[in-house]
């Protein structure tokens, strides 16, 4: 749920970018191990993936992209579309970053994203638009569903997307004024929704060329200017003026946390406004990619490698970003031969702000600059439970998604909010016949520090099992005998998340609170170094990081190439 809906955070922030001076001054970037997923995993290999031979040669391409997450692959695919050579370097033996898919004993598991929207249902999100541009829009197939089950302190219910589908739930759990407050809130949000959606996602770039790409949408931006101050504030500052019912306030806090990893008082108002529009509009539905998130990753990789312009190197750990004469010029890989990959045009980091900073040589940043980046506030980490189970006798109407909230206050407390995905309900190919694949996790609320000092493996495994127990109990709310059905069990901690997803302290991402700070943009103060991903505008979430990748790619090419790409996108939209 967290990763899918945050496309709207990106849309919401577009207006802020314009109204706060993007076209005048481009902001710069204020730049142990578990036993989980060992050699028993089946590694997905494809003909378009290159495995380095570490021959010690110096290689050159127009761009080097560090990391093959959705943001990095989106950026690389567009750069290849623009006609440039690009090398994507991935430390893991599987591509996709947090969105990778892995397999064990015939069960296929998504490492991260569980809820997708805007992929097959209009309006398309930025990721789907990128896939359209690179010719992969129709290569993916999707299963569709209408919502998820909530287990809350007030009771259990099915949250169904679509127009007026939520009102019976509000009436059941809320007070006598809840529907009036709901209507008043939606009335307040209407102009904000309009302003937040005034600009198509792929139009942005981080230089003055944005004047030309935004020009066709200037009228809409000016029309929404009167509510601009509300757009960038927190959602609670907006909703608290009309919402007083406890259930509705709690629900909105949950929705914000699922969207951004922060409660309502830290989530940008327009992000939640547009999420609500998406969930409650007529004809709304949710999408799941057949083949799991790995199918989306593979489609992006095909875009990177089309025409021989791009390649992906797996199991290739970047030791440092090379900076010569104050300019980023390439990367050095870890290994005895210290393989060098040089970038003629730019180095692009898809790593987090903390990991990117650690890759830069000491002389590239002043001590205050380095300290500021490393002190960027971060959300908590994850605990994961991946299960393969025997599905014999389970109800035919088993839902594909569940969300468990043990306490409303505070919503972001550790061991509180659990997301449960059973994607094999939507795509049976993800599990052996008669079985299901389950991924239960708690995101942005597990303290890394609990695990950091464990050196004894037995003690670490015991702690991990203890901290994952609440995930088992959450699943038992819907499948009471799940422990007796298990065929495959993998428990993951923040250490696991940090290792396999190459995330500093296993963090979900930056905890940048609305009204207090803003996400930086792709262009950094180091010439030749650009950034994309969830540490960059517009922030956390699959479509959001795809948008950051598009913004980054377009910011490194001429505005005329960018305009040609936008013209093609408009033609594709008109055709469909």
Image (spheres, rainbow, N blue to C red):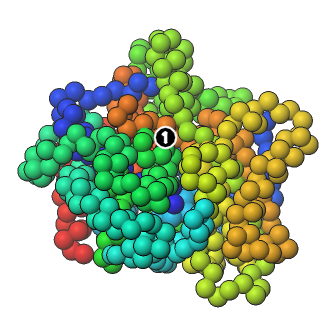
Residue 505 x/y as whole percent: 64, 35
- Report the side of 216 relative to 295 (left or right): left
Q: Nearer the viewer, residue 338 or 93?
A: 93
Q: Secondary structure at mark 1?
A: loop
Circle count: 1
Q: Give residue 207's quadrant in the image.
A: top left
Q: Residue furthest front?
A: 176
Q: Is residue 243 above or below residue 227?
A: below
Q: Is residue 35 above or below residue 517?
A: below
Q: Nearer the viewer, residue 157 or 326?
A: 157
Few, some or many residues within 10 Å of mark 1 (<14, 14–19, 20+): many
- Report the side of 248 relative to 49 (left or right): left
Q: Give residue 129's quadrant in the image.
A: bottom left
The residue that disc 1 covers is 350
On the question of residue 306 being in view, the answer is no
Q: Is residue 252 above or below residue 264?
A: below
Residue located 67% across and 63% down the image: 439
Residue 504 x/y as whole percent: 61, 35
Q: Is residue 318 above or below residue 97?
A: above
Residue 313 x/y as whole percent: 58, 46
Residue located 41% across and 58% down the image: 245
Residue located 74% across and 69% down the image: 476
Which quadrant of the figure contains the C terminus? bottom left
Residue 175 x/y as whole percent: 43, 66
Q: Nearer the viewer, residue 362 or 113?
A: 113
On the question of residue 450 being in view, the answer is yes
């Amino acid at each position: 749920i967290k990763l899918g809906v945050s496309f709207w955070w990106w849309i919401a922030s577009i207006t802020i970018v314009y109204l706060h001076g993007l076209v005048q001054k481009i902001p710069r970037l204020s730049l142990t191990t578990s036993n989980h997923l060992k050699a028993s995993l089946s590694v997905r290999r494809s003909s378009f993936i290159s495995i380095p031979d570490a021959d010690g040669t110096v290689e050159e391409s127009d761009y080097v992209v560090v990391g093959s997450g959705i943001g990095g692959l989106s950026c690389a695919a567009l750069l290849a579309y623009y006609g440039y050579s690009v090398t994507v370097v991935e430390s893991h033996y599987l591509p996709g970053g947090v969105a990778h898919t892995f397999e064990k004993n015939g069960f296929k598991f998504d490492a991260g994203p569980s809820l997708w929207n805007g992929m097959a249902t209009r309006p398309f999100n930025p990721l789907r638009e990128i896939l359209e541009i690179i010719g992969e829009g129709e290569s993916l197939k999707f299963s569709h569903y209408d919502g998820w089950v909530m287990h809350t302190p007030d009771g259990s219910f099915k949250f169904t997307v679509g127009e007026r589908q939520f009102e019976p739930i509000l009436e059941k759990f809320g007070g006598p004024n809840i529907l009036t407050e709901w209507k008043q809130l939606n009335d307040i949000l209407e102009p904000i929704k309009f302003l937040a959606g005034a600009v198509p996602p792929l139009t942005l770039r981080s230089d003055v060329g944005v004047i030309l790409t935004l020009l066709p949408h200037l009228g809409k931006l000016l029309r929404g200017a009167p509510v601009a101050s509300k757009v960038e504030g927190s959602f609670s500052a907006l909703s608290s003026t009309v919402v007083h019912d406890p259930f509705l306030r709690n629900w909105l806090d949950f929705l914000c946390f699922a969207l951004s990893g922060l409660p309502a008082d830290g989530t940008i108002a327009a992000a939640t406004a547009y999420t609500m529009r998406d969930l409650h509009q007529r004809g709304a539905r949710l999408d799941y990619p057949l083949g799991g998130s790995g199918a989306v990753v593979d489609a992006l990789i095909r875009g990177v490698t089309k025409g021989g312009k791009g390649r992906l190197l797996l199991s290739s750990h970047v030791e440092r970003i090379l900076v010569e004469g104050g300019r980023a010029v390439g990367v050095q890989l870890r290994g005895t031969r210290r393989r060098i990959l040089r970038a003629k045009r730019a180095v692009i980091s898809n790593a987090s702000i903390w990991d990117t900073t650690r890759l830069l040589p000491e002389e590239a940043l002043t001590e205050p600059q380095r300290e500021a980046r490393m002190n960027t506030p971060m959300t908590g980490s994850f605990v994961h439970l991946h299960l393969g189970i025997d599905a014999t006798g389970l109800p035919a109407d088993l839902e594909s998604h569940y969300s468990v909230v043990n306490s409303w206050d505070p919503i972001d407390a550790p061991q509180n909010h659990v997301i449960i995905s059973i994607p094999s309900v939507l795509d049976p190919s993800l599990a052996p016949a008669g079985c299901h694949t389950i991924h239960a996790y708690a995101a942005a609320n597990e303290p890394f520090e609990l695990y950091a000092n464990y050196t004894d493996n037995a003690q670490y495994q015991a702690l991990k099992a203890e901290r994952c127990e609440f995930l088992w109990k959450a699943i038992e709310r819907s499948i009471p005998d799940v422990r007796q059905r298990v065929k495959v069990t993998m428990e993951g901690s923040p250490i696991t998340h940090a290792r396999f997803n190459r995330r500093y302290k296993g963090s979900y991402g930056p905890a940048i609170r609305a009204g207090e700070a803003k996400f930086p943009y792709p262009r950094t103060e180091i010439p030749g170094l650009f950034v994309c991903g969830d540490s960059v505008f517009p922030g956390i979430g699959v479509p959001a990081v795809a948008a950051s990748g598009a913004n980054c790619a377009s910011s490194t090419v001429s505005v005329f190439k960018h305009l040609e790409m936008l013209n093609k996108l408009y033609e594709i939209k008109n055709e469909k």
